[in-house]
Image (tube, grey):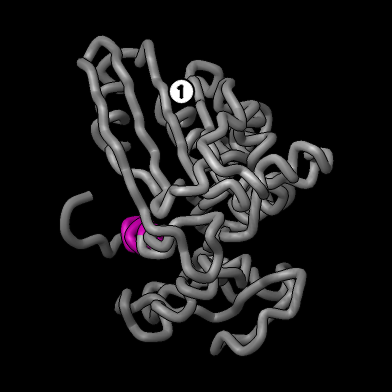
Amino acid sequence: MSRTAEGPVRVVVIGGGAIGASVVASLLRGDLPGVVPVAVVDGQPVGDLGVPQLRLDAALDLADVVVECAGQAVVAQRAVDILERGIDLLITSVGALADADLATAIRVAGPGRFLLTAGAIGGLDILSSAAAQGPLTRVEVTTTKLPTTLVQPWMDDHDADLLRVATEPVEVFRGNAREATRLFPRSLNVAATLGWVAGDFDLVDVRLVADPAAELTCHRVVAEGVAGRYTFEIQNLPSPDNPRTSGVVPHAVLRSLAALVGRPSGVI
């Protein structure tokens, strides 16, 4: 559905977890004037978030913009359909785009537009600019998180227990961003975002460390290319509602949403 020339921008949020619920609450407070949440979509009951919980197809009939906060499967299954309906889409589960065929399909879908949120990481503006000047030749990211947040369903009991009882830092994964986002879909979106910026998921070297003393989630990025060399480190407090993600992520989503609907403020 295309937005009318008058009236607020109507937002549907897919995912009523920590990120999605925070986004809905912020929009209900009026933190982004002229943008209103009209529905939340989730496969499980989410309680009273202040907007109706609807099935996706019903919610899309109300939407100008969809904010995805639900995981890679939703992006894989519905992103193209959303864009082809003329609805703009803000993607938080960037790891879905490690699938080259899906990424291509989303790039060419429309007339809806899509935007990726920076999420828990900064520095993407300069890296995007550097990649536009010439190819990045090296991108590395080391992410450090609490061990219990990294336990995955595919792990056997032995490996999962090693993380749960870890008393010192343990390297959990080393590989490229494509493999990282497949194995740790909710923990390494940062790696996927770097892969998208670099234009090559296989270029990004990812190291994931579980540290029981990690009070902050840390992402250390090193990149270089024809434009220069870049090193930066991000240290975020985990979300109190979901320690797998950083507390700053909903606010990053709101900044991205403001840019998507043409109402940014400050530095973009």
Was residue 185 drawn as part of the magenta stretch in this picture? no
**Range of magenta residues:** 252-259
- Between 22 and 73, the one lying in front of the other is 22
Residue at horizontal 68 percent and vertical 35 percent from the top: 182
Q: Is residue 119 visible?
A: no
Q: Quadrant of the N terminus?
A: bottom right
Q: Residue at x 59, y 76 (%)?
A: 62
Residue 254 located within the stretch drawn in magenta: yes
Helix, strand or loop status at disc 1 = loop
Q: Residue 4: name its quadrant.
A: bottom left
Q: Nearer the viewer, residue 241 or 45?
A: 241
Q: Who is closer to the viewer here, 9 or 265?
A: 265
Residue 102 point in image, percent of width and height: 66, 35
Image point (39%, 81%), residue name: 7
Query: Is residue 123 toward the left or the right of residue 5 in the image?
Result: left
Up-down: is 220 above or below 249?
above
**Residue 148 can be seen in this image:** yes
Residue type, label 1? Gly
The relative height of residue 124 versus residue 204 in the rendered view (above or below) is below
Across and down, in percent, residue 130 comes to 26, 23
Residue at the spot of label 1:
199
Residue 42 in the image: state x and y as whole percent. 70, 70
Please, what is the dominant secondary structure of the magenta stretch?
helix
Q: Residue at x 44, y 57 (%)?
A: 246
